[in-house]
Amino acid sequence: MTVLEAVAPAKLTLALRVLGRRDDGFHELDGLAVTVDEPHDVLRIRSGGSGVRLRVRGRASTGVPAGDDNLVARAAHLLEPIVPGASDVEVVLDKGIPAGAGLGGGSSDAAAFLRAVTAGAGVGVGTVLDVAARLGSDVPVCLHGGSARMRGRGDVVEPVAIPALRVLIVVPPFTLSTPAVYRAWDDLGGPSSARTVPAPVAVRHVCSELVNDLEPAAEHVEPRLTRFREALEDAAGLPALLAGSGSAYAVVCAPGVGWRDVAHDVEDALGVNVHAGLTMTPSA
Ligand code: C5P
């Protein structure tokens, strides 16, 4: 019986342009995504037994399904034809990434499962790219890890080299539904966000400014977001951008900024947890 442990980091969009609605109902994207070491989930995978037995625990386990609709369970079933026995596992999923925050927690869990089980079986991760895309738009970029330009519906991933950036991730006490935010983007006529943040020097070879076209749509769906963002920007003294479809915001701190001090200032002012993380290099 094998026991594997895998870390699933949060996924963050530093830039996200939504180019239009596609015939398949998804939206065409062009963005820059990174994985961040905090917050993260941990999976403990024990092979053997019969079927997928999933236990979800941890401080961010609220709202995370433990049944067959969890992306880890779906990943196990889709992996079975490639790695026999992949769906006869006990998985303990320790959640640190909040759900409904736009941080790709479920996608990252599925990607971590695919990476760990294929590596354990001596199967190249290249054999599961198709499985990753079938699981969800964000799973391919999570499977790759590190920094990547993301196109298509999110499944066309091109690695880019970016030195580690310090980011603060700030999660409001309310969540957002990704399909609802994309629907609102359609209803609002497909807006390009006018609110941009100058890109850190280390990122300028990839994009000149950070932006998130889903931000107006998310702030339309959940009007409390706007006040939350303004209070966050006041407390941090730095601009914040919505992470993916929200509800979390990210603040990129330039080298030299006392980022842990900023994190404490924001925690004190807003009364919420702030995750201080570093962007990661690819795991594969
Ligand atoms: O691919 P995934 O299942 O993670 O997507 C969740 C939802 O987000 C989709 O059902 C769709 O409403 C929306 N979405 C989209 N365009 C994308 C990615 C996600 O419309 N590129």
Image (cartoon, helix red, strand yellow):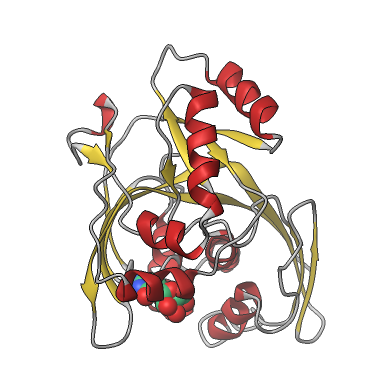
Residue 150 placement: quadrant: bottom left
Percent x, y for residue 236? 51, 24
Left or right for 14, reference 205: right
Q: Quick check: 266 above or below 121?
A: above
Q: Quadrant of ligand 1?
A: bottom left
Viewer-proximal residue among 247 and 144: 247
Which residue is rendered at x = 26% and y = 34% of the image? 203
Percent x, y for residue 8? 59, 53
Q: Quick check: 7 above or below 162?
A: below
Percent x, y for residue 96? 70, 50
Viewer-proximal residue among 251 and 239: 239
Left or right for 168, reference 190: right
Q: Classify the position of the N terminus by image quarter.
A: bottom right
Left or right for 69, reference 110: right
Left or right for 161, reference 1: left
Q: Is residue 185 visible?
A: yes
Q: Quick check: 126 above or below 168?
A: below
What is the number of callouts on the image? 0
Which residue is rendered at x = 27% and y = 40% of the image? 196
Q: Quick check: 22 above or below 144?
A: below
Which residue is rendered at x = 42% and y = 26% of the image? 238
Percent x, y for residue 170? 58, 40
Q: Is residue 131 visible?
A: no
